[in-house]
Image (spheres, rainbow, N blue to C red):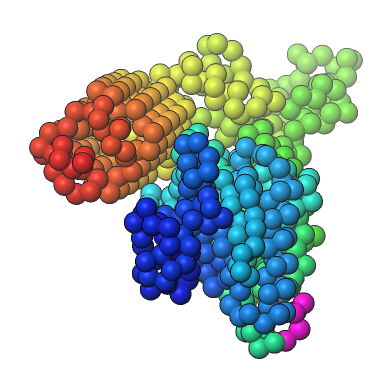
Amino acid sequence: MSYCLNPACTNPNNPNENVDCQACGSQLLLRDRYRSSRILGRGGFATTFLAIDESLPGEPTCVIKQLRPVLTAEHILEMSRELFQREAATLGKIGNHPQLPRLLDYFELKNDFYLVQEYVSGATLQQDVRRSGAFDEARAKQVLLEVLPLLDYLHQQQVIHRDVKPANVIQRSLDSKYVLIDFGAVKDQVSQTAMLGSDPDEAFTTFAVGTPGFAPPEQMAMRPVYASDIYSLGVTCLYLLTGKSPKDLNYNPTTGELDWQNLVNISPAFEKVLTTMMATSLRDRYQSAKHVLQALEQLNQPTHSPLAPYQTAPSTPSSGLQRTPPPLTTPRSQISSRQESAAARRQKSSPTSRIASRIRAQNQRLGDPLDESVGSLSRGHNRAGSFTAGQPRSEVTAARSKQAKVTPKGLLHAYSRGSRDFSGRDLRDLDLRKAILPEINFHEAKLQGVNFKGTELHKANFGRATLTNAKFTDANLSEAYLSYADLEGADLRGANLIDAHLTNANLRGANLCGANLTGASVSVSQLAFAQVNWLTVMPNGKRGKKGLR
C-alpha cells in the first residue's frame, strides 16, 4: 500500500505499483526513494508517516516527518524553515546514541519540509499504561534509571528536549530498551497570532513550548533550561504511577504544585525524589539528570539519621553512650539492692537508653517484609551471622533471600499486610492455588513449578520471571504483564489472558488449550511454539488455530 503525502488528497491509499496518486496525481515516491505506507501521527503543523527506503537493499523501514506550514505567507514559511532546520540540526547533533533515533535524511520540496529518521518499533509508555494499567514503584524507577542517562547525554550536547512525556518514550521491541523520540516540539498548531500576521518572533516562541501539563512554568514562559526536562520526566513518572494525565490532577492553590501524593502507593524516599523533580521553583528542583540518578541510588542505601554516628562510635565517655562507672574507691558489690534498682530505673529512662532503643527499632525496620512470616531470621541476626546497620539494604536482602525459605503461608501473610513487591525472589515450587494476589509484583522472580491453579492474578507483573512448568490452569491473568517471561512448558489451560502483555515471552511447549487471549499482546510466531486447540480464543477473538491466520 502506498499512501499519498498530500494532506488535501481525498483518497490517499494507492496500490504499491502506482507511481502517482490515483486521486490527486501527487508523486508517491518521495525523492525517488521513500514510499509511505500509512500515517503514524498527525498534528496541525506536522504529520508523521511510516515508510520504506526503496533505494537500499532490503528496503528498510523509516519514518518521514512532514512539516507543512498552515499558511503560505512569507513570514510563516520562514518560521517553518527555521523550525525545520533547528530540528534537523538537533537530530544531527546528538549523533549516534543507541537509544536515540538517527537522522537519515532531510530536504525541502515545494515549501514542504521533510525529515527522515530511523524507525523505532515498540510501544510508548502511554500505550503501555493504557494497555496494562499503572506501573508500580519498581517499574517506574526502572524507567527513570534508563531515561535519565539519555537526558544527561542530551544536556552534555547542549540540547534541551523540551517535550519529554509518555508518548515520546518508546520501549523498543528489539531489546526492551527505552528510546527517546521527537526533538522538535513542533506538533501543535501554529498559534492564532502567527496566522493573523503578528510579529514572527513572537509567533515562533509562542508556538514551540512543549506540551502543557508536562512542561514546567519557566518553559511555558519560553525560557527552558536543562532542569525543565527533569520536571517533564517527573510528571511522566507520575503518569506511570497513576495512569492520569497532569490535566486530570488537582493543583495546590497556594504553592502551584501538583497534588498527587494521595494517589500513589510508593515509599516516602521515592516520593521525596519525585517531589524534588517536579518542584515548580527552579531553585528547589534537581539541576541535572546526574543529581536525580544519585538520589535514586541512595534509595537502596540504609537510612541515615542523626543517630548514625552512635551506631559505630567507640564506647568512650565522649560518645555519649557509655555510662560513667562508679569510682574505683566504691566497689560495685557495696551498692545496695535499692541503689541498684534506682540505677536501673534511671538507665531505662535515660537519653542514652532511649537512643539505643531507637537504633534497635531502626535496624528492625531494615528487615525484609517476609522475615516475620517465614520465621527464618531474628531481629537483625541469624545463624549465618549479624547484619549491621552499615550494610546496604540490597546486600542484606540478597543474603536473606539465600537463607530464608519462603513458604506459601509466609507469602500470603506478607501480601495481606500490604507487601506487593516480590521481585527477584526465589519462590520455586510454591503451592499458591486459588490465592487472591491481584497486582502482585513477581518481576524477575524464580517461579519454576509454582502452582497458580485458579489464582487471581489480575494485573500481576511477571516481567522477565522464570515460570517454566508453572501451573496456571483456570488462573485469571487478565492485563498481566508477562513480557520476556520464560513460560516454557507452563500449563495455561483455561487461563484468562485477556489483554495480557506477552511480548517476547517464551511460549515453547506452553499449553494454551482453552485459554482466552483476546486482546493479548502476542505474536503469531510465539503462538506457533505453544499448544492450542479449537477452544483457544486468539488475540483477534477467533477460536482455534484458524485465528492465527
Q: Does the magenta segment cover residue 201?
A: yes
Q: Is residue 41 left or right of residue 97?
A: left
Q: Does the magenta segment cover residue 276?
A: no
Q: Is residue 413 left or right of residue 279?
A: left
**Count of numbered tags:** 0
The residue located at (71%, 73%) in the rendering is 79
In the picture, the quarter occupied by the C terminus is top left
- Residue found at the far bottom of this picture: 196
Identify whether 400 is placed above or below 235. Answer: above
- Residue 142, percent from left and from top: 56, 40
The residue located at (38%, 38%) in the rendering is 503
Q: Which residues are magenta?
A: 198-203
The residue located at (31%, 38%) in the rendering is 523
- Residue 186, percent from left and from top: 62, 66
Asked if residue 98 can be seen in this view, the reply is: yes
Q: Is residue 407 left or right of residue 190?
A: left
- Residue 114, percent from left and from top: 60, 60
User: Is the magenta region chiefly helix, strand or loop?
Assistant: helix
The residue located at (73%, 60%) in the rendering is 86
Q: Nearer the viewer, residue 35 or 98?
A: 35
Q: Nearer the viewer, residue 328 or 294?
A: 294
Asked if residue 342 can be seen in this view, the reply is: no
- Residue 48, percent from left and from top: 51, 60
Which image quadrant is residue 294 in? Answer: top right
Identify whether 139 is placed above or below 510. Answer: below
Q: Is residue 207 left or right of residue 61?
A: right
